[in-house]
Image: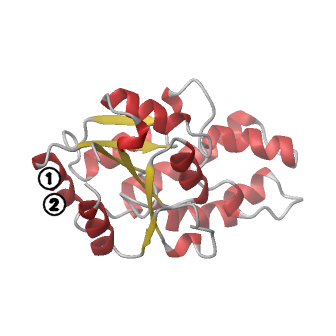
Amino acid sequence: MQAVLFDMDGVLVDSEDYWVTREREALLPRAVPDHDVAVSEITGMNYREIYDYLEDEYGTAVSRERFETLFEDVAEDIYREDVTLLAGTHDLLAGLERRGVARAIVSSSPHAWIDIVRERFGLHGSFDAVVSAEDVDGPGKPAPDVFEYAAAELGVPPAACLVIEDSAHGIQAATAAGATCVAYAIDAHEGIDYGAADAVVETPAALSRAVRERI
């Protein structure tokens, strides 16, 4: 493999644990109060696309502007106060750099949220590319566009990329792009189907081993 593409939410940081709670208890009830929408329906999607999805499928009770403001306020709290960095991340990234393997963050989150994480955990300079779904002129995950875009930014074919993902939408996007995918199974996504992934791991140590075995 010539490159490793890391999802941010649920992989680099444990934000999905917090997002699932906030989406289930606050954001979804505000947006679609007359429907019981499973968080799994929107996990891995860009938050602006989430509004489109909810509007198309259920009809929303808030404006797009209000919905986005609610999401942005929650994001500030989650990324500045709540999340922790995946154990062993700095060592894993340093090892990939020593071996000449390109590294990228590929996230559905906007750059503003990614930058909070990079600043808070000292990740500036650790990645060769930082890609948000907002960079892509096309659909977000589960479509493959964001991973195809990231591979092009790194100058490697998608088939030479190893993707680390935690959500069903992210795994679908990675495999649709033709990349190898390691699924990082977390409690926040209990019950999702990881069958499309090439491997499934459950701990930071196992994730690091799975990456090193494939490069």
Type of the residue with mark 2 = Asp
Left or right placement of residue 14 versus residue 192 in this view: left
The C terminus sits in image quarter: bottom left
Task: Classify residue 126 by image quadrant.
Answer: top left
Residue 174: x %, y % from top left: 51, 48
Name the spot of residue 121 as percent of width and height, x first. Answer: 25, 53
Judging by the rendered image, the residue that carries numbered circle 1 is: 94
Three-letter amino acid code at disc 1?
Ala
Judged from the image, the secondary structure of the residue bearing numbered disc 1 is helix
Residue at image location 41% in from the left, 42% down from the top = 159
> Looking at the picture, how far across and down is residue 143, in whole percent?
62, 40
Does 47 sit left or right of 64 as displayed?
left
Q: Give the answer, above or below, for where 149 lies relative to 100.
A: above
Q: Are marks 1 and 2 in contact (CB under 8 Å)?
A: yes
- The image's mark for residue 91 is 2
Give the residue drawn at x 85%, y 47%.
57
At 18% across and 39% down in the image, what residue appears? Answer: 125
Residue extending farthest to the top is 137
